[in-house]
Image (cartoon, rainbow, N blue to C red):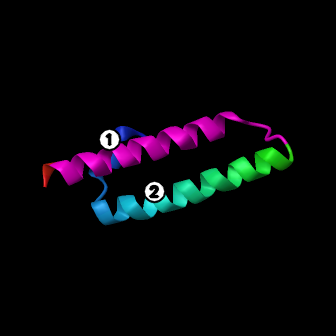
Amino acid sequence: MKIEDIKNMPTNELTEKLKSVEAEYSQMLLNHAVSPLADTSKIKASRRDIARIKTILRQRELNK
């Protein structure tokens, strides 16, 4: 997910997206602990997406 896409999303949609990405991330970690994933770069990408979304949400919170 690109930063421009995140910036253009409304706040309520971003919070929903954050919940879904975090759930997906925790599921990937669980699956990886049981049996190694074929593409572990998805874990890193999800972690970065979570950080991007949280950053934009925090910026919006501080600007209000």
Q: Which mark identifies residue 18? A: 2
Q: Residue at x 71, y 35 (%)?
A: 40
Q: State yes or no: residue 57 in magenta.
A: yes
**Range drawn in magenta:** 36-62
Left or right of 53, for residue 34? right
User: Percent x, y for residue 21?
Assistant: 53, 54
User: Percent x, y for residue 60?
Assistant: 22, 51
34 and 10: which is toward the camera: 34
Image-quadrant location for residue 64: bottom left
Please tell me whether residue 37 is drawn above or below residue 13 in the rendered image. Answer: above
The nearer-to-camera label among 1 and 2 is 2
Left or right of 3, for residue 23? right
The amino acid type of the residue labelled 2 equals Leu
Q: Residue at x 34, y 43 (%)?
A: 55
The amino acid type of the residue labelled 1 equals Glu
Marks 1/2: CA–CA distance = 16 Å
N-terminal-most mark, 1 or 2:
1
Inspect this view and state whether residue 15 appears.
Answer: yes
Please tell me whether residue 27 is drawn above or below residue 49 in the rendered image. Answer: below
The residue wearing badge 1 is: 4
Image-quadrant location for residue 41: top right
Q: State yes or no: residue 10 in magenta.
A: no
